[in-house]
Amino acid sequence: MAANYRRFTVGPDPFDRTWDVLFQWQQTGISIRHADTVDVKFRLSTGPRTEEKVIAFPHPDLLTLTKELGRPLTDAFCLKLAALHLQNMIKTDQDMEKVLVTVPLPVMRQLAKELASQAPAGASR
């Protein structure tokens, strides 16, 4: 994935489409849907088709993950995990029919490993 997690292109998907992705916002789900999550919203487009996706991370799971990794829970970390998850969704067409996708802890762990493997040596978290 490119270093820009706020605006990027993903493709092709299983239908040979390329998607332009734009980060919209990030906030706690408790404020909008009474859920203990961190929600990250993206706008996706391919040709004339536009969609919205909200990637939701359960807050207790994020705390578990960051404790396991020995890192702070930051907005940037959540954005990067969400962008990676969305990229995987697009490439596999998994959960693309959903607007709200809640990511379980085992998947969050895998995303964190993927993110760590992309970081240049000596890069800050």
Image (cartoon, helix red, strand yellow):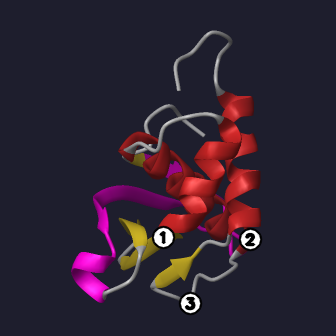
Residue at position x 48%, y 66% in the image: 59
The three-letter amino acid code for the residue at tag 2 is: Thr
Front residue (pair 5, 77): 77
- Mark positioned earlier in the residue sequence (1 or 2): 1
Please state the horizontal and vertical placement of residue 10, each as a whole percent of the image.
57, 54
Q: CA distance from mark 1 to mark 3?
A: 13 Å
Instruction: Report x, y in % for residue 113.
Output: 75, 42
Q: Which residue is mark 1?
A: 55
Q: In the image, which residues are magenta?
A: 8-33
Q: Indicate left or right for 44 with 9 as reference.
A: left
Q: Which residue is mark 2?
A: 92
Element assignment for label 1: strand
Residue at image coords 31%, 87%:
34
Residue linked to disc 3: 97
Q: Is 11 within the magenta?
A: yes
Residue 102 in view, yes or no: yes
* 71 horizontally vs 113: left or right: left
- Name the front one of labels 1 and 3: 1
Q: Nearer the viewer, mark 1 or mark 2?
A: 1
Q: Residue at x 46, y 44 (%)?
A: 73
The numbered mark at residue 78 is none
Considering only vertical position in the picture, is 107 above or below 115? Answer: below
The earlier-in-sequence mark between 1 and 3 is: 1
* Quarter of the image where one finds residue 67: top right
Distance Cα–Cα, label 3 vs label 2: 12 Å
Q: Are marks 1 and 3 in contact (CB under 8 Å)?
A: no
